[in-house]
Amino acid sequence: MAVNDKILKLLTPITEEEKSILEGHKFDRTIYADSSAFVIDSKKFLKGNKLIEIRPHTRFLHFPEHTHNYVEVIYMCSGSTTHIVNGNKIILKEGELLFLNQSARQEILPAGEKDIAVNFLILPEFFEMDISSAGKYGGIISDFLIGCLSDKNKNIDYIHFNVGDMISVKNLVENLILTIIDDKPNKRSIRQATFSLLLLELSNCTENIIRKDDYDQELLFSTLKYIEVNYANGMLKEIAEKLGCGESRLSRLLKRLTGKNFKELIQIKRLSQAAYLLAETDMPVLEIAGNIGYDNTSYFFSIFRKQYGMSPKKYRDKYKKVYVK
């Protein structure tokens, strides 16, 4: 039996909650939350010391607007579902992924019997292993991960990946589902390793990200994508011209939406890339500094220490043992 067939066989049967909905019973919010403010509570579904869990998407129900106190990733196994996220309509089709952090406000329209989706419920601590080398994922995914762990950095609160035709992504997601279903030895390490591979694969698919925000958010998103590729020598003037936007306006917009100017965003990306290269490669420190755009090595050492609380050498000594074998 193919992996997807096995998953569909597990997820297709009508659940007790769905049976109650079909019988006309009122939506039971206590399944999801105890508070009047509709924040879906991870404690309802993540028992014991679990950091990640899956549950089938509840069909036949118009799910009212809500947030989560965990990170949610929705994978569409078959059919489609319609989501309203921060006021934006998203139609999630077979094979696509929707990442939502704790700030995203989500409403879901009713799904049909053949609209099968898996909801990954993930506590922010699950991502902590990846943060020290988040630079390997690129700016957009790195910003999302960091935002999941920080109340001060939630500029990207959802990502819609149009990757339905990418077999590599499909295989990783389905393998992740099976590692959660099957209670195997070393399950936590396997899940984190599989999820890291999924993020790495998605980092090569930024052109498949769909955004339907307002114009200012689109400018921000395009600028972050530009920084992701051009962090070593990118210039505000260049991206402003590409976007048909004045430098001053783009600079003010970045400051308003992120709390940082273009130079600071470039620096954050450069330093995250430096951290990644220190942890994952044997490249000499001075070569890393030049590679990410710093000719003044003294300045690089100074800002790296300020960002990470240690010198590049100490950072490598601490994390290379974990990430490089």
Image: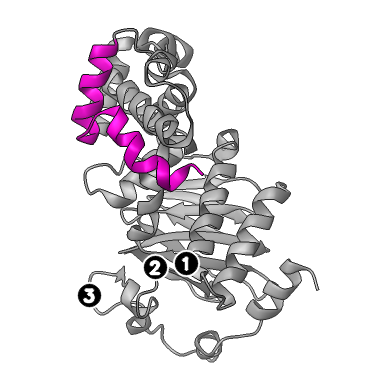
Q: Which residues are magenta?
A: 297-325
Q: Is residue 213 visible?
A: no
30 above or below 61?
A: below
Magenta segment: does it hold 298? yes
Which residue is rendered at x = 32% and y = 77% of the image?
A: 43
**Is the magenta region chiefly helix, strand or loop?**
helix
Q: N-terminal of the two: label 1 or label 2?
A: 2
Number of the label disc, if any, that sits on residue 81: none
* Position of residue 8 in the picture relative to residue 19 (left or right): right
Q: Secondary structure at mark 3?
A: loop
Q: Secondary structure at mark 2?
A: loop
Q: 240 or 197: nearer the eye?
A: 197
Mark 3 → mark 2, Cα distance in angstroms: 25 Å
Residue type, numbered disc 3:
Ser
Which residue is denoted by mark 3 in the rendering?
A: 36
Please tell me which residue is depicted at 36% across the width and 77% down the height of the picture.
32
Q: Earlier in the sequence, mark 1 or mark 3?
A: 3
Numbered circle sitting on residue 51: 2
Mark 1 element type: helix
